[in-house]
Amino acid sequence: MGIKTNLIFLIIAIIFTVSPLIFAFLGLALARLFRCDFNAALVVCPGNDFLSNLLSVMIMSHWLGLFTLPIGGIVSVVLLIGLASQFIVK
């Protein structure tokens, strides 16, 4: 695998790893922007049920990090080792 290909896969692995956290923080920011209320695990936006449901799902998406963080971390380490070995050989 070439260096460019390895870097592209590494960037994809890092984005995969942190994407649930990015969505959760984005959901929190949007909830504050639209002045929504937080009720336990739900977000309540006055007059807009779709936005309430969307933001609730976005905020709860951080639980997907239980899968993406270990998997993406292992893949990233393997790709970093491969990238380092390519630089050492050349």
Image: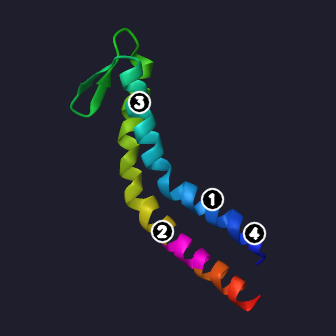
Callout 4 secondary element: helix
Image coordinates of residue 34 in percent, x first then y, are: 40, 17
In space, the residues marked 3 and 1 are separated at their CA atoms by 24 Å
Please tell me whether residue 19 is drawn above or below residue 71 in the rendered image. above
Please tell me whether residue 78 is drawn above or below residue 21 in the rendered image. below
Which residue is identified by label 3? 29
In space, the residues marked 3 and 4 are separated at their CA atoms by 34 Å
Magenta region, residue range: 74-80
Quick one: label 1 or label 2, which is nearer the N terminus? 1
Residue 43 location, quadrant: top left
Three-letter amino acid code of the residue under disc 3 = Ala
Callout 3 secondary element: helix
Q: Nearer the viewer, residue 64 or 4?
A: 4
In space, the residues marked 1 and 2 are separated at their CA atoms by 12 Å
Is the residue under label 2 in contact with that under label 1 (CB below 8 Å)? no
In space, the residues marked 1 and 4 are separated at their CA atoms by 11 Å
Quick one: label 3 or label 1, which is nearer the N terminus? 1
Which residue is identified by label 1? 12
Residue in view at x 41 percent, y 39 percent: 25
Q: Which disc, if any, is residue 73?
A: 2
Q: Which disc, if any, is residue 5?
A: 4
